[in-house]
Amino acid sequence: MSSRYQAVKGTRDILPPESQHWTIVEQTARNLFRQYGYQEIRTPVFESRDLFVRSVGETTEVITKQMYSFQDQGGKWLALRPEGTVPVLRAFIQQGLYNRPQPYRYFYIGPMFRRERPQKGRYRQFHQIGVEVLAESSPLADAEVIAMAAEFLGSLGIRFTRLEINSIGCLRCRPAYITALKQYFGNHRDALCEDCINRLEVNPLRILDCKNPDCRDLFPNAPSIDAFLCSNCHDHFAQVRNFLHHLAVEFNFNPRLVRGLDYYMRTTFEFLVGESSAQNAVLGGGRYDGLLKELGGPDWPGIGFAIGMERLMELVPREPFHEESYEVMVIPLEPSAILDALTWTQHLRQNQFSAWVNTNSVSLRSALRLANKCRVPFVVILGVDEITSGKWTLRDMRSGEQIRFEPDSLMEHLLRIRQTN
Ligand code: HAM
């Protein structure tokens, strides 16, 4: 059968059993983040367009090329959120969360939208698990946030990622670096791609994020940020690295690591897989002191990260997810058995079994074939014999063994099997 409607390009359906793996990964994140004192926050998927334009950066590609923005029927400009940090800060300010006691540690899980060219690991609707920490300026916060990210990836059994960190300085020291970059790339203007020629004028730092090989060839000799950091930024970064050493988190210092969003300052970091390129970043984050104030909130610092779920799920080994399932299919073969089957199946669920009544199959044979196909381990059969004798048949689908029990004993038997497994 060919489908008349297709999912929109760059979006995809997450089907079972993959959806179950997603749930387990999300639950792992929830559990770990709670241990670190984070609480969940859920914000709308669309916001005022303006909210993103200024904070993410008017000249960033996320805003100029990728953001889904539209005017609604009332003429208001809205945008599907391209990322989660700014909405969390908006909610923090609007809902007065700063009046509550510390810590201000939040996490979120949900879809984001960017109109990028779809390819493996790059979608137009993708999902992020993100965290934001507000009002913590110590380099310890940077190190702890990064260490928690590393712990999360490790707890999922993901090994081959490398952590790259950098400091992109602050409003005091970055301008001199940007001037130096402008001068350097200006001298190599002919070798730059068209986008970078434009970036040279509007946002020279962004050139370091370019994927064009000709532009990248110029990077090794480009000025390095570490020579430009002011003493505060320098000290902060040195302490972040010390704490990371102390927490046994391995990292590479990458002085060319800039991020695609404008609100960062000081510490930036990414967890990469494969050859170095932004497309392979499974997780990205950094410090964004000043952003909360710019959005109208208190002058408090902030730091966080977001993980791309689609990229993450490519890396998660499936073995740890082998979950013992106790599925039971109940097959009433007579119309008079249906009500008993229904109530008893409810009973199974109250005992935490996953169970369902099969009223679709036309014969016992076809019901068993279906149970086999679905890998249901136990089947309970209610035919004429079972109803008249009051003893129902339990079939172990793996061994083919069948035993008859009264309904109460049958339940006890299943509970015993679960306990001993
Ligand atoms: P970002 O680097 O733009 O940062 O995105 C974070 C992660 O989302 C990326 O590392 C990647 O795994 C995933 N991602 C981004 N775009 C796509 C896409 N089109 N398809 C699939 N995955 C994608 C942020 O969004 C910041 N808000 C992170 C942050 C939080 N910084 C501080 N707090």
Image: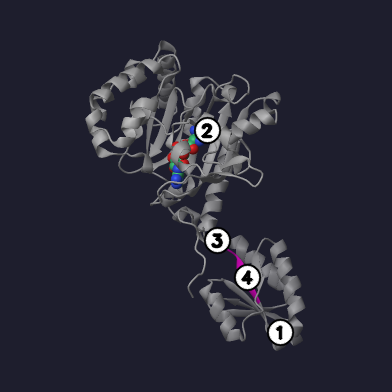
Which element carries disc 3, helix, strand or loop? Answer: loop
Q: Position of residue 70 (x, y in %)?
A: 56, 44
Give the numbered dot on residue 324.
3
Q: Which of pointers 1 and 4 lies earlier in the amino acid sequence?
A: 4
**Would you name the residue on which mark 1 appears?**
386
Looking at the image, residue 238 lies above or below residue 52: above
Q: Cβ of disc 4 within 8 Å of ligand 1?
A: no
Say which of marks 2 and 3 sits in front: 2
Residue at x 67%, y 60% (from the top left corner): 352
Q: CA distance from mark 3 to mark 1?
A: 29 Å
* Residue type indicated by callout 1: Glu
Q: Cβ of disc 3 within 8 Å of ligand 1?
A: no
Q: Which of pointers 3 and 1 lies earlier in the amino acid sequence?
A: 3
Q: CA distance from mark 2 to mark 4?
A: 53 Å
Residue nearest the viewer, comparing 341 with 335: 335
Which element carries disc 1, helix, strand or loop? Answer: helix
* Residue type indicated by callout 2: Val
Residue at x 28%, y 21% (from the top left corner): 223
Q: Which of pointers 2 and 3 lies earlier in the amino acid sequence?
A: 2
Looking at the image, residue 353 lies above or below residue 396: above
Q: CA distance from mark 1 to mark 4?
A: 17 Å
**Would you name the residue on which mark 4 appears?**
328
Residue 203, can we see it? no
Say which of marks 1 and 2 sits in front: 2
Q: CA distance from mark 2 to mark 3?
A: 48 Å
Residue at x 54%, y 57% (from the top left corner): 20
Looking at the image, residue 306 lies above or below residue 12: above
Q: Position of residue 358 (x, y in %)?
A: 65, 76
Which quadrant holds residue 332?
Answer: bottom right
**Would you name the residue on which mark 2 appears?**
53
Q: Position of residue 408 (x, y in %)?
A: 74, 71
Which element carries disc 2, helix, strand or loop? Answer: helix
